[in-house]
Image (cartoon, rainbow, N blue to C red):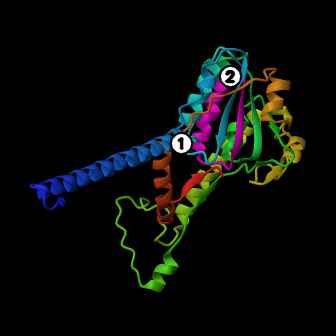
Amino acid sequence: MNTPENEPGWERQLLEKIAFASLQEQRAKRRWGIFFKLAGLAYLVAVLLMLVDWGSSEQLSDGRHTAVIHVHGTIESSGEGSAQSIGEALRSAFADKGTAGVILRVNTPGGSPVQAGIVHDEIRRLRSKHPQIPLHVVVEDLCASGGYYIAVAADQIFVDKASILGSIGVLMDGFGFTGAMDKLGVERRLLTAGENKGFLDPFSPQDVKQKEHARVLLREIHQQFIEVVRRGRGQRLKETPDMFSGLMWTGSQSIQLGLADGFGTVGSVARDIIKAERVVDFTIKENIAERFAKRLRAEGAGLRALFSNDRFLLR
């Protein structure tokens, strides 16, 4: 009886079979490896496509519409809350031939007086250049300080009865660490050329002259804010002793004080005031890279703020 072991060259045939089976197994592993890599890449691309803002295609559409620009979060020198982003959105909205009116949808605690001032002035410039296009503000939850500085450039300000408006004031915040340094036995060694170069240094005792100088700066910026509010609201404003003290009011109270004009939403203002119910979003939004960079900056900003010089805020 012949068996495989008795056939000539059976060892070679067996080795060939084993080698072939091993080769097939390696090929199968390679194919599955490629499949899973491609699947992972496809998933990553899908996530990126969902995260990336490709811009609003509505801006390219034809027809009469109400342009909406969102002003939300802190007003600062970078990102969606910067004068550059808001200004670019305003210019695009006013330049669009189909724009019947513009709405600023505001929800902000305020921020930089410089950035707020730039946006305010740009609104006034564009309104003068395009007198046929009205600009209204619709306040959602909050329109405080720098947000209100921007809002008073509008033709009308609309609120919800529970909205919060006001905080017409300026603050300069910071920290002092001299007591903690004394307890820890830490000595501050500050060298300057110019006696006030270490202005309000948080690691040095507060200087009376520097403190008073800071108050002078605050009063001047506050007065600029007051003048802007008076100019923007005009005869509608019913001034009270507390109006420019930094207090805030509800939407209902703000209408009574002349800080706002009436109740309204983006939809109702577009439909009933501008008479163009179709809404197109012109907000300039951050892309994924900008959002990631901003998050990294924000994580480091908290600690840096503890050791930085004081800063002015309309907030």
Q: Is residue 205 above or below residue 107?
A: below
| Residue indicated by mark 1 | 51
Note whether 45 is above or below 250 in the view shown: above
Residue 35 visible at all: yes
Q: Is residue 70 above or below residue 124?
A: below
**Which residue occupies the foreground of this view, 188 or 52?**
52
Residue at figure coordinates x 81%, y 36% from the top left: 265
Which of 11 and 229 lies nearest the eye of the viewer?
Answer: 11
Quadrant housing residue 223? top right
Q: Estimate the x, y position of residue 192 in percent, counting from the top left.
A: 35, 62
Q: In this view, does 216 lie to the left or right of 260?
A: left
- Could you say which disc has been placed on residue 285 in the image? none
Q: Is residue 25 magenta?
A: no
Give the mark toward the camera: 2 or 1.
1
Indicate the position of residue 61 as horizontal and vertical percent values: 64, 18
The quarter holding residue 146 reads top right
Give me the residue at 53% from left, 59% from top: 310
Amino acid type of the residue tagged 1 in the rendering: Leu
Q: Quadrant of the N terminus?
A: bottom left
Q: Nearer the viewer, residue 152 or 19?
A: 19
Residue at mark 2: 127
* Residue extent of the magenta highlight: 100-127
CA neighbours of label 2 inside 10 A, class few (<14), some (14 to 19), many (20+): some
Vertical arrangement, residue 126 with respect to residue 110, above or below = above
Q: Is mark 2 on a helix, strand or loop?
A: helix
Q: Is mark 1 on a helix, strand or loop?
A: helix
CA distance for labels 2 and 1: 35 Å
